[in-house]
Amino acid sequence: MTGVTVRVPAKLNLQLAVGPPRADGYHDLMTVFHAVSLFDQVTVEPAGRDGVTVTGEGADRVPADHDNLALRAVAALRAAVPDRRPGPGNVHATIAKRIPVAAGLAGGSADAAAALVACNELWATGLSQQQLGAIAATVGSDVAFALLGGTAVGRGRGEQVTPALVPATQYHWVLAFADGQLSTPAVYAALDRLRGERGDGQSPRAGGPRGVGPREIAEPDLDAALMSALRSGDAARVGQRLNNDLQPAAVSLFPALRKTLAAGLELGALGALVAGSGPTCVFLAANAERALELAVSLSGAGVCRSVARVSGPVPGAAVVSAG
Ligand code: C5P
């Protein structure tokens, strides 16, 4: 085989509930992932040594060395393949990006998932979907979902994914890309700081005024009303239940997002939220025509760098050509 090309979607989080920081620095999550029709494409070909070339949207901001998440995924898969001859050789990965970098859409994780699927095919490893998922989980918190796609519930760091039992209703979304980026660890740290300032999650001080003790940070729980809205397939209900605990933290680091979110709602979106750790803003529209109107109005309002219309759910990373 001379090369394998895989297409992989961006993700949204329709719910992102974040628990307190864990001992390992991560946060326990409860999230509803949703894959949308904005795709990167990754091609792997046998090569003298492992390497990567990145083209397209934001390519200059993606590491082109062994820090690249796709190459880390290649190495993780190689290490997991049982010993046999011929073994998994070196590869060159070419990543064609349409998912903006550091935008809250898990583009890096998507590329890693695509590299896993591509090398799995190229090397004919014979690993099961479940084994690939376990390798994905070691590469990054969102990689396992990029393999699965659709709409799914994520637990743990987000790496434990199970398909959501909801009808395959298509939803129409408008993404507003920001003029700038946010670092995921910085947004989680800002959330911890904001919660600290409010006194959340600290043990009550002796002798403090009664009834005003610090609040506990709740264990993240699945939003039953969102799941019921998704089961009904009613976009208006889904729009009302979109929620993201990281949103206040992202807005505190990127205050212009407040204006973008307000503009989308004023222009008739059924719901609005920040995508993952941001700074992309996500708007739900009632149908494809409304999404087009909203996209045109939003780009005219001057509240973002550019807009895209997408729909979801779509499948996870999949081979588009192999030869
Ligand atoms: O797993 P991934 O490399 O995508 O995570 C990037 C960063 O986001 C982590 O280093 C951590 O700071 C933060 N994170 C977190 N809790 C999660 C997922 C990510 O704190 N569940």
Image (spheres, rainbow, N blue to C red):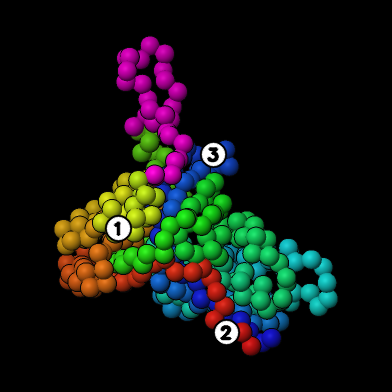
Q: Give the side of residue 215 with respect to residue 150, left or right.
A: left
Residue range (magenta): 198-224
Position of the C terminus, as image quadrant, is: bottom right
Q: Amino acid at mark 3?
A: Arg
Residue 202 magenta-drawn? yes
Q: Give the side of residue 94 with respect to residue 292, left or right.
A: right
Q: Amino acid at mark 2?
A: Ser
Tell me which residue sits at (26%, 64%) in the image. 285
Q: Is residue 202 above or below residue 314?
A: above
Count of number-bearing discs: 3
Q: Is residue 70 above or below residue 229?
A: below
Q: Nearer the viewer, mark 1 or mark 2?
A: 1
Tell me which residue sits at (23%, 73%) in the image. 289
- Is disc 1 placed on a helix, strand or loop? loop
Q: Measuring from the top left, give residue 245's x and y in whole percent.
A: 37, 45
Label 1 Cα crowd, 10 Å radius (few <14 / some 14-19 / many 20+): some
- Is disc 2 placed on a helix, strand or loop? strand
The reply to whether dot 1 and dot 3 touch (C-beta < 8 Å) is no
Query: Mark 3 — residue?
Result: 22
The answer to whether residue 315 is seen in the rendering is: yes
Label 2 Cα crowd, 10 Å radius (few <14 / some 14-19 / many 20+): few
